[in-house]
Amino acid sequence: MRTEQRMRSFAMQPVCLMAAAVILMGSDAAWKNKPANQWTEEDARQILDRSPWVRENRATITRRLTEDQLREGGQMGQPRGIGNEGVDAKGSGPKVSPNVFSGPGGDDRSPRSLPRPMTLQVRWESALPVQIAELKAHEVGPPTLEGDGYRIAIYGIPGADFKGDPEQLGKPLKGLAALKREGKKDVRPVGVEVFQRENDVVVVYLFPLSAEITKKDLRIEFDAQIGRIVVAQIFDLSEMEFMGKLQL
C-alpha cells in the first residue's frame, strides 16, 4: 500500500510542478502587472513568445497523395504553392530499389505519405498588447493587412521562394479559414495575404469587425488550411484582457 502511495505521489510531482509554473508565469506576466511604457524588451518577448494572444500551435501536415490518387481526382502531378512545397524534409521520399524484379518497388510508405505534426505560431496580430510588444522588441515590419478588422497571423510556414503580390498569393487560402464560436455562424476572412520572410512564410488573415466578438463568446477557434498544413487554435477570451478591456 505504501509503495502504491509513493508511486502515486511521485507521478503527481511533474503535474504539480507544471501547474505551479503556469501560475507563476501568470503572476509575473508583464501585461498584467506593468504599464506598457515600462515594458522591457524581455517583457515584449514574453508576450510575443507565449501569451493569451500568441500560441504555439501543433499543426498537422496531411499525408502526400500518390500519383495514382492524384490522377483519380483529375490532377496531374503534386500540387505546388504555399503549404505544399517545402513541407517535406529532404530524403523523406520513398526508397525505390533500382532492381525492378526483386526490389520493393515504388509504393510510397515513406514519412511524407503519413500525417505528422509541425510547430507553428498563431498570433492575434491586431491586439494592442501584441502591437506594443512588436515595437518594444524592435520587430522590423511585422506583416499587416490594410483595413480595420481582427488580424490573425500564422508564423513559421516552410518556404523561402514565394515571391509575388501578397494578396494574390493569399487568395487561394481565403475560403479555407474561419473563426468559430458556439451557437454562431462561422466568420470567414475578408482578406488573406502571404509575406515571405528570410527563412519562412507568414500568412495573415483579416476578419471583419462585424463579427462583434465579445467576452460572452467565452472562447473562439481559429481554423485554417494552407496546402497540406491544417491549423486549429482555440483562444480563451477571458484571458485576452489588457487595461481592463478585451483586446483583439
Image (spheres, rainbow, N blue to C red):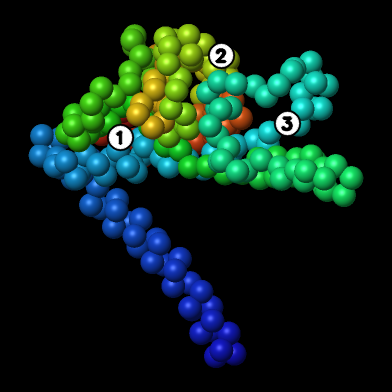
Q: Residue 165, position in %: x, y? A: 42, 9
Mark 2 residue element: helix
Instruction: Give the spatial CA distance, label 3 vs label 2.
Output: 20 Å
Which residue is more in the foreground, 32 or 59? Answer: 59
Q: Nearer the viewer, mark 1 or mark 2?
A: 2
- Total marks in image: 3
Answer with the quarter of the image where residue 20 lies.
Answer: bottom left
Classify residue 144 as left or right of residue 208.
left
Q: Which residue is mark 3?
A: 65
Question: Does residue 130 appear in the picture of this structure?
Answer: yes
Q: Earlier in the sequence, mark 3 or mark 2?
A: 3
Q: Earlier in the sequence, mark 3 or mark 1?
A: 3
Q: Earlier in the sequence, mark 1 or mark 2?
A: 2
Residue type pointed to by label 3 = Leu
Which residue is more in the foreground, 57 or 18? Answer: 57
Residue extending farthest left: 38
Q: Which residue is mark 2?
A: 172
Q: Residue 54, position in %: x, y? A: 37, 37
Instruction: Give the spatial CA distance, label 1 vs label 2.
Output: 33 Å
Residue at 43 percent across and 34 percent down: it is 156
Instruction: Give the spatial CA distance, label 3 vs label 1.
Output: 43 Å
| Mark 1 surroundings within 10 Å by alpha-carbon count, few (fewer than 14), some (14 through 19), many (20 or more) | some
Mark 3 residue element: loop
Placement of 192 over or under 237, stated as above or below: above
Residue at 46 percent across and 38 percent down: it is 120
| Mark 3 surroundings within 10 Å by alpha-carbon count, few (fewer than 14), some (14 through 19), many (20 or more) | some
Residue at 77 percent across and 27 percent down: it is 67
Q: Residue 223, position in %: x, y? A: 54, 28
